[in-house]
Image (cartoon, grey):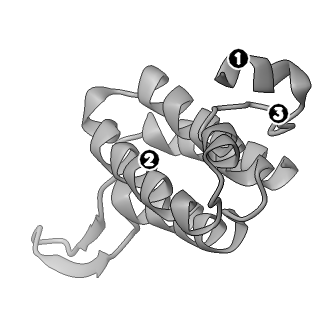
Amino acid sequence: MLAIDQIHRLLRVVGRRHLHGEEILDAAGRVRLVLRTPDWEDFVHIACNEIRACGAGSVQIPRRMRAMLENLIGTLPPQRHRALEEQLDLLDRTLPDFYKLPEDLALARVPDAQGLGGASTRSRAG
């Protein structure tokens, strides 16, 4: 969970920044070098895809991921939402492969900032 907490913090910081490539100009103002940098979609992809693919079978991971994504959608500017919403959609489509029982699937879909999946959060899912 600590890794997801750090990724959440990183995405919150990066999501508030203006992301663009950097150009180095010569004395005449001509572009001499373009430094390619990741864009927002790259950061979200790197942050989420592997964790979702490898961790979806552990109920705490999708719950913590959902809480992170929903928090970022609620706190970052609207232009950042599409990539985050796509990750929520991917998470929702991934979970049925891991959770065959409806109760387990419902529990895995409840956002939980701590990712505990304990009894106190289970009662809110039902």
Which mark is nearer the camera, 1 or 2? Answer: 1
> Is residue 50 or residue 34 the one in the foreground?
50
Q: Given the image, on which type of amino acid does mark 3 rest?
A: Gln
Q: Position of residue 49 (x, y in %)?
A: 53, 68
Earlier-in-chain disc, 1 versus 3: 3
Vertical side of 50 occupied by 114: above or below = above
Inter-mark Cα distance, 1 to 3? 15 Å
Q: What residue is rendered at 56% in x and 36% in y? A: 12
Q: Position of residue 55 (x, y in %)?
A: 71, 66
Q: Given the image, on which type of amino acid does mark 2 rest?
A: Leu
- Left or right of residue 55: residue 14: left
Q: Residues within 10 Å of mark 1 (few under 14, many from 20)?
A: few
Residue 99's quadrant in the figure? bottom right
> Is residue 61 or residue 110 the one in the foreground?
110
Q: Position of residue 84 (x, y in %)?
A: 40, 45
Q: What residue is rendered at 65% in x and 66% in y? A: 51
